[in-house]
Image (cartoon, rainbow, N blue to C red):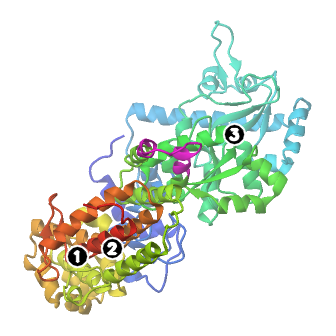
Amino acid sequence: MSLPPGFLDELRTRLSISDVVGRKVMWDSRKSNPGKGDMWAPCPFHQEKSASFHVDDRKGFYYCFGCHAKGDAISFVRETENVGFMEAVEILAGEAGMTMPARDPQAQEKADARTELADVMEQAVQHFRLNLNTAAATQAREYLTRRGLDGDACQRWDIGFAPDRGGVLAALTAKGIPQQMVIDAGLAAASERGGAPYDRFRGRIIFPIRNARGRPIALGGRAMDPDAKAKYYNSPETLLFDKSRTLYNIQNARTAAGKGQPLVVAEGYMDVIALSESGFGAAVAPLGTAVTEHHLAMLWRIADEPVIALDGDTAGLRAAMRTIDVALPLLTAGKSLRFAIMPAGLDPDDVLKQQGKGAMQAIFDAAIPMVQLLWQRETEGRSFDSPERRAALDKALRDRTAVITDPGLRGHYDQALKELKWQLFKTRKPQARSGQRNVAFKRGQEDWHRDLAPSASNRSSALGSGTARDDHLREAVIFATLIATPAAIEPFVAQIEQMDCTDPDHAALRALILRADPADDMAATIDAAGLSATVDRLSAQNMVRLSSGLRKPGDLAFAAACLAEAFAKLSTARTLPQELREAQEDLDAGDEGLTWRLRQATTARDRAAIIASGSAGEMIVADNGAELDSDELSAARALWDALAIANPDKDPK
C-alpha cells in the first residue's frame, strides 16, 4: 500500500517521539531536558543500567550510544512491537487521531482475509482446549502430567487435544464457517482422491502457535500413537503462517527478555514450556525448520546475544553448525550468539527434571561464544601433524570468516582463531644440550625486551612510537580533522566507535562527534557541550596543527587522507606489541612458521640499516609500499637478534 504525499510528515508532526518512546522507557531526570526535547533513558533494546539512549524531540530521532539502535517513531514501534511498517503506521495514526488512507482493493482484501482466518484459528484453539477435558483425551492428559504440566499450566499455554474422530472441521462448519476457510486456515485438507476434506490434526495434543501480537496463526500437534509417521506435526504454510519467520512463544519471550531474562532458543514446544514454567520465560523455538536469517533478525531485536540451547546429541550439534553458517554473514558488532550444549542424551526438559533449575542456569552461564564452536567444528577429531594439514585448516578458517561483512568484527574473529591455533600447535620446547645455550637464549630475551623500551631518540619523536602520549596525539589529530571537516566522518564511523580513547576528554569528544549532525554548526555544538576548552588545548599542539585537517578546513579529500593515515598509525602502534608477543609464542612453539618470521625479520633489519644514521621518526618505504617508522624497525631488529640467539644453527639470511 502506498501512502499519499505528506501523510507521514503530518503523522510525525502530530506525535512527539518522546511520547511514543516514553511508553517503553523510564526517563533519566538528571540527564534529560524536557524543555529542549532532549531526553535520555536506559535503552529498551539491550540490557543496561546507564542512560545511553537519547531521544531528540526536535529532530524526531532516537539513538543508543550502547547498541547503536537508531530511527524515528515508526521504526521504534516496528522494533518494540515486532510489526511491519504499515502496521506501525496504523498504530501511530490511531494515537494521533488520523484516518488511514483507503487501501487499494487487493491489499484490503488480503488484510481482511488474514483477519477472518485469525478469527477461525481462535475458534479452533478454543475447540481443542475443550476437547482436552473429554474422556477421549485421557491418554493425552496422562502424558502431559508425566511431563510436569498440570491443568493450570495447560490453560496458560492453551494446550488442547484433537480426537481421532469428530474433529475441528465438523465443529467449525456447524457454526456456519465456510469449509474452504477452514482449509485455508490449515486446519483441514482437501482429499487428493476427490473425496471429502479431512482434519489435518487427529489423535494429537495441540499446541497453539501465536505471532508476536498474540494472535493464533498455526497449530503444532504431538502424536499419541507411537507408530505415527510424524511425532510432531505443524500447520502448513498459509496466509497467516510462515514458519521461517515465526518463533514459538515469541510474544511472551519478548516481555520476559525486557525484564532481564536471557533469551533462549530451544528445539521444540515442550522444551520452551518446561523452561518457561521453571522461570526461564524468554524461551522460544523454531517450528519445523532450522534457525533462519529471519529468525535471527527477530532474536537480535530482542537481545544482543541469544543463547542457542541444543540437545547434547549428534542432531543437536548438527543444528548448531547449521545455525553458525546462517549467522556468520549477518554478524555485526555487539550482535552474536552463544551456545549452551546440554549433557549427552538430554534436552532442556530432561535437565530441568533430573538436575533442577540451578543446573540449567549453570549451563546457560557457561554458554560458549560462536567462535569456539566454529573452531570445534573445524578441528575436532582431526590430526594436524603436517604442514599441508595445517595449511588446509588455515584455508578452512579463512573461508569461514570471509563471509563476515563487518571488517572490524572479521578481524577479531581471525585473531581469536589465530590464538586458538597457537594453543593447538604449541609444543614443549626441547631442552638445550648445553647450559651455555640456555643462558644465551635467556640473555637474548632480556635484550629483546630491553630494546622494546622507547629510547631517548624515539621519545623525542612526536608520532614515532607506541607510547600513550603518542596515541593521545594521534587521537587528537583524528578529532581535530573531524571538527574542521565534519562531513568526513561517514567512512570512519565504525573505527571511531571502536577506538579506545586515552582520556575522558577524548571520550567525550568522540561521543559528541558520533551523535552530532555534520550539517550543524560544530563550534556551537562543542560550546553547548562544554568542550570548548578541550578543543582549544587539542588544537594548540603543533603536531596536531601540522598533521590534521586543520590545515585545510572543509576539504573532504584532504580530511579523508588525514584520517586514514592517523587511524593506520594508531592501529599499527596498538597492535605492534601483540605482534611481538605472537612472535615470542612462535619462538616457544618452535613451529614451521619460524622460518618465515626469520626471513621477515631479516628483511626488516636490512631496512633498518638503510636509515641507521637517520633521525628518530624518519620514515622509509618498504618494497611493498608500506611505511616503517623507527619504532617498528627497532622492534624488528630486536626480534631478529632474539631469533638468531634462539636458533644458532640456522642462518637467518
Q: Residue 285: where, in percent of width, then height?
A: 63, 45
Expressed as whole percent of the image width and height from the top left, the position of residue 353 reads 83, 52
Q: Earlier in the sequence, mark 3 or mark 2?
A: 3
Percent position of residue 489, x then y: 23, 68
Name the mark nearer the viewer: 3 or 2. 2
Residue 516 seen from this side: no
> Can see residue 443?
yes
**Mark identifier at residue 551:** none
| Quadrant that contains the C terminus | bottom left
| Residue type beneath disc 2 | Arg
How far apart are labels 1 and 3 at the CA level?
A: 56 Å
Q: State if disc 2 and disc 3 touch (CB < 8 Å).
A: no
Q: Toward the viewer: 229 or 203?
A: 229
Q: Which dot marks residue 478? A: 1
Taking the magenta stretch, the answer to whether it contains residue 259 is no
User: Which residue in the structure is indicated by mark 3?
Assistant: 208
Q: Residue at x 72, y 23 (%)?
A: 169
Mark 3 or mark 1, which is nearer the start of the sequence?
A: 3
Three-letter code for the amino acid on which mark 3 is drawn: Pro
Q: Residue at x 7, y 76 (%)?
A: 552
**Viewer-proximal residue among 381 and 4:** 381
Mark 1 is surrounded, within 10 Å at the Cα level, by few (under 14), some (14 to 19) or many (20 or more) other residues, namely many
Determine the CA span between mark 1 and mark 2: 16 Å
Task: State the SS at label 3.
Answer: strand
Magenta stretch, residue numbers: 373-392
Q: Which mark is residue 574?
A: 2
Label 1 sits on a secondary structure element that is helix
* Amino acid on which the number 1 mark rests in the picture: Ile
